[in-house]
Image (cartoon, rainbow, N blue to C red):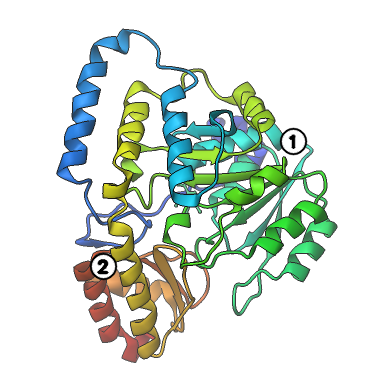
Amino acid sequence: MSEVEALLRPELRGRTAYGAPQLDVAVQLNTNESSYAVPPEVVEAIVGELREGLSGLNRYPDREFTDLRKALVGYLEDRSGVSLRPEQVWAGNGSNEVLSHVVQAFGGPGRTALGFTPAYSMHPIINETLGTTWVDGQRDAGTFDLTLESAVEQAKGADPHLVFLCSPNNPTGTALPFDVIEAMLEAAPRAIVVVDEAYAEFARPGTPTALSLLERHPRLIVTRTMSKAFALAGGRLGYLAADPEIIDALRLVRLPYHLSVQTQTIARVSLEHADRLLESVDAIKAQRDRLVTELTAMGLAPVPSDANFVLFGGLADAPTTWQALLEDGVLVRDVGIPHHLRVTAGTPEETGRFLEAMARLVPTHA
Ligand code: PMP
């Protein structure tokens, strides 16, 4: 063990850092970003407002990001029909940061968090690196569904301080029914229940958002991001909605002025152009549905998806197929589920490139 490793917190020793490979490949379908560039008129609007604000960079940004919170409330009301107050909204540099605020405030040493694997792998990482004990609950091994009975039983067994649900779930793609969320609030009576809705805008029609449950449940937190549907992964803006008392708790752990002037401006102006930025969502959903149809036709086993990606099974050896796709210029994600890979829905051309490469591989890889 090196001198530095000996000084590291024991629970961090031997760990590897989270992160998908960032490779220079023609078709990048591995991190569920949007393939669509920010439209020129939105770029212009952002640059205009940034320019106006630049001479004020000698001052710290608005610590309470007041205008941005109002804009987020407006967006949620427009799109989800749920009326919130700005005091119910919190934001950070990506939803990963707001998730870490939640764990800093409500988790930590001596506390337990429950999630249902396979789900977003940063949920356990954020918890464990902050000292929370992670309980790896399970989904149905075949369908990846989380049934109400199974969720309740696992929650009662763990009696957690935090529960992480992901709807639509990454990497499996499916959304959770409301009754599972409400049953978790009941079965884990001392827990903050987080519903990670990073992919909510891609859900199939009729999929409810947990935002509408907030009024009834003060222990519920719904997290969202501008990284996916808004095509703003590089802007780093994630947010959550919850009871104002929860927001007050998050203020205790956030670093002062965590949202820079640039971040607040980019996010706020982008929200003003929400309709334009979200225009690509329908095109992405069409490619997602195309992936499910065509992978099924190839004899593979895609999981139905409410997100901008598809998990598919039926591969003899997922790492071998991942490598073969890479050699064909297509980067997808090996999420560590045997015989499965995850592919992001890209533009029609990118999705076509992936499907053509897969069709070539199926005879020897399926
Ligand atoms: N939640 C889920 C389910 C995700 O898949 C991701 C990104 N892959 C995030 C949160 C974090 O995204 P960001 O920090 O860019 O908002």
User: Could you tell whether 143 is left or right of 111 in the image?
Assistant: left
Check the image and report above or below for 224 versus 340: above
Residue at the image position 52 percent from the left and 70 percent from the top: 337
Pointer 2: what residue?
Answer: 330
Residue 32 image offset from top left, x and y in percent: 38, 57
CA distance for labels 1 and 2: 42 Å
Check the image and report above or below for 309 versus 17: below
Residue at the image position 44 percent from the left and 38 percent from the top: 74
Q: Does the closest atom of ligand 1 sit within 8 Å of the Cβ of label 2?
A: no
* Number of callouts: 2
Q: Quadrant of the C terminus?
A: bottom left
Task: Inspect this view and state whether residue 140 appears.
Answer: yes
Pointer 1: what residue?
Answer: 109
Tag 2: residue type?
Answer: Val
Q: Does the closest atom of ligand 1 sit within 8 Å of the Cβ of label 1?
A: no
Residue 210 image offset from top left, x and y in percent: 60, 53
